[in-house]
Amino acid sequence: MTSTMNALATTVAQARDEGFTREVAASSSGQELNLLIAPDTDLDSEFAAFDLDALETISVKGWLGVFEDI
């Protein structure tokens, strides 16, 4: 579901400043992630997200996961 992108935001504050303001729980193939994404993200596309547990910006292939707003 994910792969690490070039390091961008490394704190929640930086991620929010970059526009990642929508918090979602993501799951796929037994993997669970807590993410911040842009409010208008198309969840059926590949998109950037901020992983709240690993504190890094990642790329998510949305069509492989299930997402729930928190």
Image (spheres, rainbow, N blue to C red):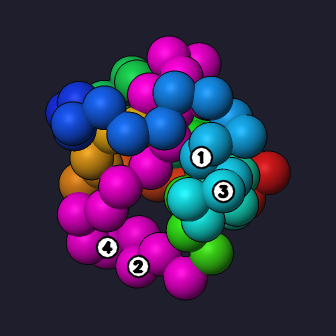
Check disc 3 and report the residue beneath it.
17
Quarter of the rendering containing residue 22: bottom right
Residues rendered magenta in the picture: 40-56
In this view, the residue in front, 59 or 65, is 59
Q: Is residue 41 left or right of residue 11?
A: left
* Label 4, label 2: how far apart the Cα atoms are: 5 Å
* Label 2, label 3: how far apart the Cα atoms are: 20 Å
Decide: marks 4, 2 in contact (CB < 8 A)? yes
**Would residue 27 be seen by someone viewing this image from the given angle?**
no
Quarter of the rendering containing residue 35: top right
* Label 1, label 3: how far apart the Cα atoms are: 5 Å
Instruction: Describe the element under mark 4 as helix, strand or loop.
Output: loop
Amino acid type shown at disc 1: Ala
| Residue 42, numbered label | 2
Closest to the camera, between mark 2 and mark 3, is: 3
| Residue 44, numbered label | 4
53 above or below 29? above
N-term mark: 4 or 1: 1
Q: Residue at x 44, y 49 (%)?
A: 49
Q: Position of residue 56 (x, y in %)?
A: 44, 28
Quarter of the rendering containing residue 20: bottom right
Closest to the camera, between mark 4 and mark 2, is: 2
Instruction: Describe the element under mark 1 as helix, strand or loop.
Output: helix
Instruction: Tell me if residue 55 is in the magenta stretch.
Output: yes
